[in-house]
Image (tube, helix red, strand yellow):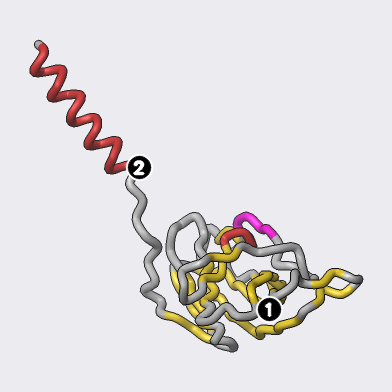
Amino acid sequence: MKKGFVAVAFCLTLLLSACTESTPPSDAAGVGKVKDTITQNGYIMTLNSLERNKSLGAGKNAKEGSIFLFLDITIVSDKEYGVDINPNFSRLRDTEGKTYNPVSGKTPALSNTNNLGKGDKIRGFVTFEVPEKATGLVYEYIPLSGMLLKFNLS
């Protein structure tokens, strides 16, 4: 009886650990650059432009030693049942492995949209504040599906 219980508990532990184990995002689509379009898993993403500025306007300046990056992004859905868009799926990574999350910034901002229908498109800015000395910046977009779209900003 005890051996059977231990065997069942062991199997359940294996099953649960397999379900909760996270896999790193796949970057099978490769790495784009400004003006490139990347297509992966129903997302067609274009990094239209990149602008660097010390100010957001209206008296909002970057912290000392930092700069704002404004990424103008277009996303088109190529999935029959739609794709989810959220600027919080975005991050920047530098050569030291540091990551930077979006901040409120340039408008119109990329909006949070659930189930963007096939053929529909959305365009907006994602803003980051990063150290001026940050190098090798890469924009990463990681929706809940876990796949990865990457653009080299260098």
Separation (CA) of disc 1 from disc 2:
35 Å
Is 115 located above or below residue 56 in the figure? Answer: above
Residue 72 position in % (x across, y down) = 68, 78
Which image quarter: residue 126?
bottom right
Report if residue 25 is visible in the image: yes
Taken as a whole, is the magenta stretch helix, strand or loop? strand
Check whether the beta carbons of the residues at disc 1 and disc 2 lie within 8 A of each other.
no
On whether residue 126 falls in the magenta region, the answer is no
Residue lying farthest right?
58
- Residue type pointed to by label 1: Asp
> At 63% from the left edge and 55% from the top edge, which residue is drawn?
114
Which image quarter: residue 34?
bottom right
- Residue type pointed to by label 2: Thr
Horizontally, residue 106 falls left or right of residue 91, namely right
Report if residue 116 is visible in the image: no
Secondary element type, mark 2:
helix
Q: Which residues are magenta?
A: 112-116
How many marks do you count on the picture?
2
Q: Which residue bears the numbered disc 2? A: 20
Q: Which of pointers 1 and 2 lies earlier in the amino acid sequence?
A: 2
> At 82% from the left edge and 72% from the top edge, which residue is drawn?
61
Q: Which residue bears the numbered disc 1? A: 72
Disc 2 packing (10 Å; few <14; some 14–19; many ≥20): few
> At 74% from the left edge and 68% from the top edge, which residue is drawn?
109
Q: In terms of depth relative to the viewer, which is nearer, 144 or 39?
A: 144
Residue 50 position in % (x across, y down) = 66, 84
Residue 12 position in % (x across, y down) = 23, 29
